[in-house]
Amino acid sequence: MLALRLLLLPAILWLQSCSSTPPEGLPAPPKAIVGGTLIDGTGRPPIPDALVVVELGKIVIATSSNGLKIPDNAVKTNAKGLYITPSQTGARLEYGAPADLFLLNGNPLDNPLILGSPMRVMKTGEWLDANKK
């Protein structure tokens, strides 16, 4: 039994090291949402092929991805064909705002009911369905 435990310990440690959760005390890597249409809540027209970067639960970039570099260590989410919107009425996706957002499969400006069924939800910078990338 002891031999079995000694064999399993390295496997368990290796599996824990493969986790997407950063070691305790270290901040999570930034998240980059790429390619979707951004409706930022400011009243500006939608921005196609947008880039939204989230660090420490806050929006640090929310604009067109044209020419912007994604941080090397960012966890990327492909939002091509989706709409990126604030998850709360009256909220704005702009620098320093809390990263609470929806990824939607339709334009909420054309069909507000789509807000009731988001594809993905981010709350304070973390995907609630963290198993999806």
Image (spheres, rainbow, N blue to C red):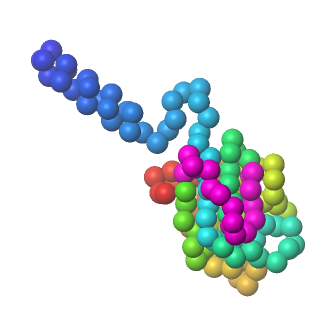
Q: Residue furthest right?
A: 43
**Residue farthest to the bottom, as pictured:** 110
Q: Is residue 45 magenta?
A: no
Residue at 50 percent across and 38 percent down: it is 21
Residue 122 image position (x, y, % from top left): 63, 54
Residue 101 % position (x, y) = 69, 59
Is residue 126 shown to the viewer in this render? no
Query: In terms of depth relative to the viewer, which is nearer, 49 or 5?
Result: 49
Q: Position of residue 110 (x, y in %)?
A: 73, 84
Residue 9 to residue 32: above or below: above
Would you say residue 55 is visible in this rendering?
yes
Q: Quadrant of the image for the N terminus?
A: top left
| Outermost top residue | 2
Q: How many marks?
A: 0
Q: 39 or 109: nearer the eye?
A: 39
Against 10, residue 101 (above or below) is below
Whether residue 31 sits left or right of residue 67 in the image: it is left
**Residue drawn 19% across and 19% down?**
6
Q: Where is residue 82 in the image (x, y as percent from the top left)?
A: 60, 73
Above or below, comparing residue 95 to residue 44 in the picture: above
Residue at 65% in and 58% down: 69
The magenta segment is: 59-75
Apparent side of residue 34 relative to residue 7 in the rendered image (left or right): right
| Residue in the picture at 82% in, 67% down | 41
